[in-house]
Structure formats: structure tokens, C-alpha cells
Image: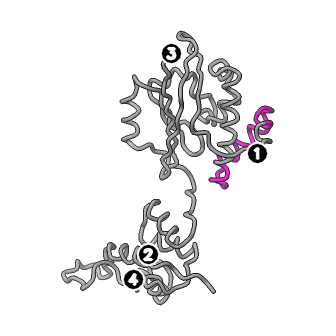
Amino acid sequence: MPHTARPDLGEYLRRHRAALTPPDRTGIARTSHRRVPGLRRQELSEIAGISVEYYTRLEQGRAPRPSREVLTALARAFTLTDAERAHLFRLAGELPPEPLSPDSEIRPGLLRLLRTLDDTMPITVHDGRLDLLAHNAAADLLGPLSCTGRYGRNIVYQCFTAPAVPDVLGDAGAGQLARAATAELRAALSRYPGDEYLQSLHAELSETSAAFRDHWERGEVGSFHSLTKRLRHPARGWLTFDSEVLHDPERDHWIMLYTPREPA
């Protein structure tokens, strides 16, 4: 027997339908008010491309659980944000759809935070493809933050191709970074399976780097969010940082904070 839609899904649909502006199909501004706000069920079902009978039963909690295609059509009809769409899918007992790609723009508030902490701690921001999007002035001590070429701002590409990485991190630190970056790349490919940039990056490293192939064969996947990092500064010697990673899931941005440790 098929599962029926949950009552709270119907309430969510009713609230969003009531918030929509009725269409003006005459080209003349409306002078009268409807007895109920928002779109009628017939109007919403036409926009979503589903039958009004089925949509009515969804709102009433009497319909079979909607398919992912129906949920996608409803999200489009309601012009839901990514967060609202994810909530709609969860209410229907479905996993939210993954975004096709990470956002390319950083929140203005996050950029202000980076500048505010210029004299306090290094901060870098990467997207879900592991490309560097921004860093503050304090992050300059981390060493070269980009290479040349198409993948020059990618963490994974840097740690397997940039000659300065072992000098800045030491052999142990460079190995730790290579392991973590490879596991993150596997996770990124899983999250964005159709992404041409990630696929070509993987192909490039697989062809040119024996070290990358060795790490890839381990099959590790996941995130390394709390690490201790030692960096060799050309003037100040070895510096130790506790690094923490924060995630902005809506844009799939990763904020890496490097808190300096006080000398023992």
C-alpha cells in the first residue's frame, strides 16, 4: 500500500500558495479582492503541471506520497529558495536534491569578516569544487595560495603539483594535506557527479601524478574538519595552527579558520 503524504506537507503547500500573487490574465490591474489570499488550487496546479484533483488531495493529506518529479514541479511553481525546496522534499519523505554546482559568489558579510580578521587569524574560503574563492591578508603566511593554469586555485591540484608545498608544510604535513584533499575530491565528485571541471581535474591528476594515484587507490572519502597544522614561515620559522572548517551549505562554501597557537 503506498505511503500517503504527511499532513504537515499539506500545511506547507497551503501557506506557500496563500503567499503567491494571483496572475493578471486580462492585462488590467485588479480592483477587487479575493475572499482568500494567494492562488487558487486550479491556478497552482496549472503552473506546476499536475492535476488539480491530485494537488487538492496533497493539501488535504489524502494523496499518495508525491514523486521527486512532482516535488520538483511544485518547488518551481512556488519559486522556492534552495532551503525551502530542501524542506519541501524532507516533508515528503525524500532526500533534498543536490545542487548542480556550488555558488560562485561569497556572501558580503563573510567578505567583511575576512577583512576584519586580517590582523588576527588566516582565513581562506573554498567552494565545493575545492577552488580557492578568497582569503584575507593574514593568510599570506600560508605560502603560495594558487598555481598557474586552469586548476591553479584548486586545493587538490596545488598539493600534488606546487613545488612549495613540502617546503611550507614539511613532508608529514604535505602528506596529511594530500590525504585530506584526495578524500575531499572523492566527496566532491559524489556530490557533483556530472561536473566536467571535477572530472577533468581527476583525469589530469590521475595521468600526471603517481602520488595522487596512490592516495586515490585508498578509497578514502569524507571531510577533515579539525586539524593541527604546522607551517614554515621564511622569517618566523615553524608556526602551529589549529584549523577548523565551517560550511555554508546553501552556497557550498567552506571557510577555513587557522587559530595560531601560543608558544609553549
User: Are discs 3 and 1 less than 8 Å apart at CB?
Assistant: no
Which of marks 1 and 3 precedes in the sequence? 1
SS for tag 4? helix
The residue depicted at 33 percent of the width and 76 percent of the height is 18
Task: Farthest residue to the front: give it.
Answer: 264
Q: Residues within 10 Å of mark 4 (few under 14, many from 20)?
A: some
CA gap between label 2 and label 1 equals 41 Å
CA gap between label 1 and label 4 equals 50 Å
| Image disc number at residue 219 | 1
Which of marks 3 and 4 precedes in the sequence? 4
Residue that label 4 marks: 43
The kind of residue tagged 2 is Asp
Q: Position of residue 159 (x, y in %)?
A: 67, 30
CA gap between label 4 and label 3 equals 67 Å
Residue that label 3 marks: 263
In the rendered image, the vertical position of residue 110 relative to residue 250, given as above or below: above
Does 187 lie within the magenta span?
no
